[in-house]
Each structure stands twice: as structure tokens, then as C-alpha cells.
Image: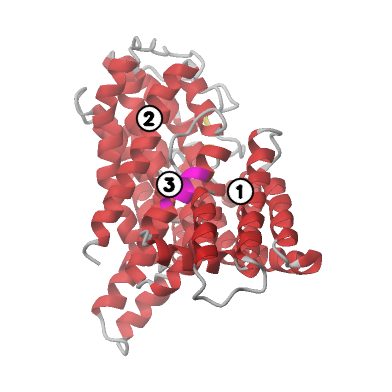
Amino acid sequence: MTALLAAGALLAQDEAPAPPAVPPALLITAAVLGIVVIVLLISWLHVHPFLALVFGSAVLGVVGGLGPEGTINSFSDGVGSTVGGVGVLIALGSMIGGLLADSGGADRVVEAVTSRVGARALPWALAGVAALIGLPLFFEVGVVLLVPVVLLVAARARVSVLAVGIPALAGLSVLHGLVPPHPGPLVAIDALGADLGITLAFGLIVAVPTVIVAGPLFAKLALRWVPLAPPAEVGPGQPDPDPGAGTTTTRTDDGEPDAADRATGSGVRATRRVSVGAAVAVVLTPVVLMLLRAVAEVALPEDSGLRAALEVAGEPVVALLAGVVLAMLVLGAPAGLDRRAVSASIGGALPPIAGILLIVGAGGGFKQTLIDAGVGDLVGRAAEGIALSPLILGWLVAVGIRVATGSATVATITAAGIVAPLAADLNAPTVALLALAIGAGSLFFSHVNDAGFWLVKEYFGLTVGQTIKSWSVMETIISVVGLALVLVLSAFV
């Protein structure tokens, strides 16, 4: 909002551009009022973000000169295009995550890695595992899957839960904010018109060092700020320490959940253990296909048959659909799931994302209202006048919305809508980096208005102060390091 006000003041002094139909000051006022309405409804009245975005769009459109009918049309167009472009991808990614969880595939990856490393390497192993299984899983699902493992590993190694918990959370959070097919990056890519393959490649390049800095390295410092005793190990037959699983899980003599007792919220129960290779293949297949498409577009001639095939296979919808089919084949029957159980697992993955789809759709409507009212062009001209890097501008706007609302998705959607006009004059790699800069800004300083803050606090048994010193600082490190790496990459593209 500060950037918007500065932009309005700058444009008021600049008489060179032809004045728009609506005075710049009124457009700035409309944008600020729309954002303030969203912030107050979410953070003060605790209104659902979907409704907050609807009301914010209405205020923006009416004050910004679109009128009631124009506002409704703009909002509807934005919802339709966003859900059409992003909704299917989110649904397919959720299906992969559901099968990965219900089949026990995620458990197998975690067990395989943690059972083969020593105590000193555990933080690094947990960060790597969280990043890997975080590719297709939403943050909250990843937390629910990893928390029991984190508690068990910390108890066995006799270390603080933060020693392994911070690296695991960093791996999940970085992937959630920077790497498609998570909702935030997908929305930014769609709003900015970025190339998904290039954004995915850059996202992975930025993600690895960011996870290292905010995970295993920061965990050492967090242990000094938040000294915690090692948790007590769960013994055979005792309840699972995961308070969000909704079921009671018995454990075998080695302390691991029995395969026959693995059940998730979908009600699907795996009776056999799947292979680690199968789970890893399911996770990586969509990523590899999309990366191969990006490489083919750069390295192969346009008339190449191989390039044409890879372009089709690497289309996000095709790549994720291939991941779903592969998951059904290599995780379904091998886990003892019949066709009905596989269908139930896939179907059970969809209801939890309904709220996310509504928020994403309403955010697309807000973005389109911003554009149709002329706010985006206004900010674009102002950014040229103040010589501020679009990458830094996108990050700053996302930071402001994130701190105010607590929602990374709302921050990404709003920031992408505001700076979208700047992408028209940028090359494809820079547009991809702009999407990542916005994603990094959307993770800045999670605090008490963020559901993730309370999720971490309750699962790890922390106080509010301890959660701020560990989780909130970790999120801020992710945001700042992510921006720094984006700026470094921008110097080479």
C-alpha cells in the first residue's frame, strides 16, 4: 500500500502521460480501500478470505469507476479464467498427494531416509525428505504427515524437536511458496503470464540453498533461542503423537506404524508397504516432464518431432495427469488398495481443497478488477518513474499483504495482480523470477494471524514467544534469502 501511495503522488506530479478516464488519485484510493477492506475483514473480523476478496473487489470496482455492473463482470471474468487455468492443476496435484499419503508412500520415503543416517545428519535428512514429499503435497498435509516422524526421530536421537522440526518445516514451506504445482506459484504464473517450466527450474534452483539456510543452518541458532528437552518416545501400542490424524495408530516393536494401521482422513487403509522407488517416481514424474519441456524449448529446433512430443508431455495438465495415473498404478494395488479404494483416495483429496480453490478464484477476480479499473497500468507507469526493480516491488507488495492478512495465497494473488502490467515489458526468464519474488514475499514473517503459525505451535508444544523465535524467524529467513537468490539469478538472465 505504501508503494501504491508513492506511485500516486509521483504520477500526480508527472504531466507527460495522458490522464486516464479516472483520476490517478481516485484509482489509488480505490486500490487502497479494496486492500484495507480485505485486510480488516480477514485479520479483525475473521471473515473467510473468499468473502473478504469478494467484498474488497466490490469496493475497488465501485470506487475505481467500473460501476456495479462492470465490477461484477470483471470479477466474474477473473474468477473464471483463474479457476480454469489453475484449478485443474491444483486438483491433480491434490490427487497425487492423496494417493501418496493413503498408500503409505510418503511414510516409506521418510523411513528409508531417516533409518540410514546418523544423528548429526538427521536435520539435513529431514529437510531433504520434507522438500521431496512437499512437491505434490500442500503444506498442512505435509505437516500432518511429518510431525509424528519428527517427534519420533527427536526422541530416538535425544535432541530437541526443533533440531529436526525446523529443517522439515523449511523444506515444506519453501516448496509451498516457490515451486509449482502449489497454489501460490501457480496463481502468480497465471497472473503474470510466466512460463511454468522456466519458473519451475528457477524455483528449484532458489529452493535448495534457501532450504539449507533456513533449515539445518538456522536450526542451530533456533536451539539457542528456544531450548527444549527431547520429547518422550512413543512406545509400542501407545497412541500416535499426531493430534490431527483423527485416528489412533498402534506401533510395532520397532516404533514404526504398522502398514495395516495406516489410515487417513479419506478412510482408505493401506494393507501392504509400497516401494520407496515407486513413491519417489510418482513425486518426480510431473516435475521431470515439465523440466524436459522447458529444456526442449531452448535446446531443440521448432520443427523437431521430439520437441513437439516433449512440449505436449510437459504441459502442466498432462504432466500432472501422468503423475496421477502413475500413482494409481504403482501405489494403488501394491498398497493393497482395490479400484474402489483408489477412487475413494482420489475423491477424498478433493474436498479439502475446495476452500483453496474458492480463495484462488476470488483472488483472480480481485486481480482482474484491479486491471480493468486501471490500477495495474498506473503502478506500471509509476514503477518506471521511480526506477524500482519489478522484482523488489513485487516482493514488497507481497510482504505487506502477507503481514497484514496472514495468508500467503492472498498475498501472492494480490501482489501478482498489482504488478502484472510490469511483466509485459520483461523477458520470459525475468517474468519467472518476478513470480518467485512474489512467492518469497508471501512467506515473510508468519505470526498470529496465520493458521500455519498455530499449527506449528500446537504440534510442537511451543509457546507463542517460542513459535515467533523459531517458526516466524524461519519464514522471514526464507523470504529474504529467496529474494536475494532471485536478484542474483536476475543478473544472469
Above or below 123: residue 300: below
Q: Earlier in the sequence, mark 2 or mark 3?
A: 3
Q: Earlier in the sequence, mark 2 or mark 1?
A: 1
Residue 316: give x, y in percent of width and height. Answer: 46, 66
Question: Element under label 3?
Answer: helix
Q: Is residue 118 visible?
A: yes
Range shown magenta: 395-400
Dominant secondary structure, magenta: helix
Residue 171: give x, y in percent of width and height. Answer: 35, 39
Question: Element under label 2?
Answer: helix
Type of residue at label 2? Val
| 432 magenta-colored | no
Q: Are marks 2 and 1 in contact (CB under 8 Å)?
A: no
Q: Which residue is mark 1?
A: 356
Q: Is residue 40 left or right of residue 490?
A: right
Query: Alpha carbon of mark 3 to alpha carbon of mark 1: how far?
Result: 19 Å
Give whichever of 423, 169 is nearer the camera: 423
Above or below 359: residue 16: below
Residues packed near mark 1 inside 10 Å, few (<14), some (14 to 19) or many (20 plus): some
Residue 441 - label = 3
Residue 200: give x, y in percent of width and height. Answer: 36, 59
What residue lies at 69% left-to-right and 62% top-to-bottom?
64
Type of residue at label 1? Ile
Query: Alpha carbon of mark 2 to alpha carbon of mark 1: how far?
Result: 25 Å
Number of numbered markers: 3
* Residue farthest right in this picture: 68
What residue lies at 78% left-to-right and 66% top-to-bottom?
67
Residues packed near mark 2 inside 10 Å, few (<14), some (14 to 19) or many (20 plus): some
Above or below 202: residue 475: above
Q: Which residue is mark 2?
A: 473
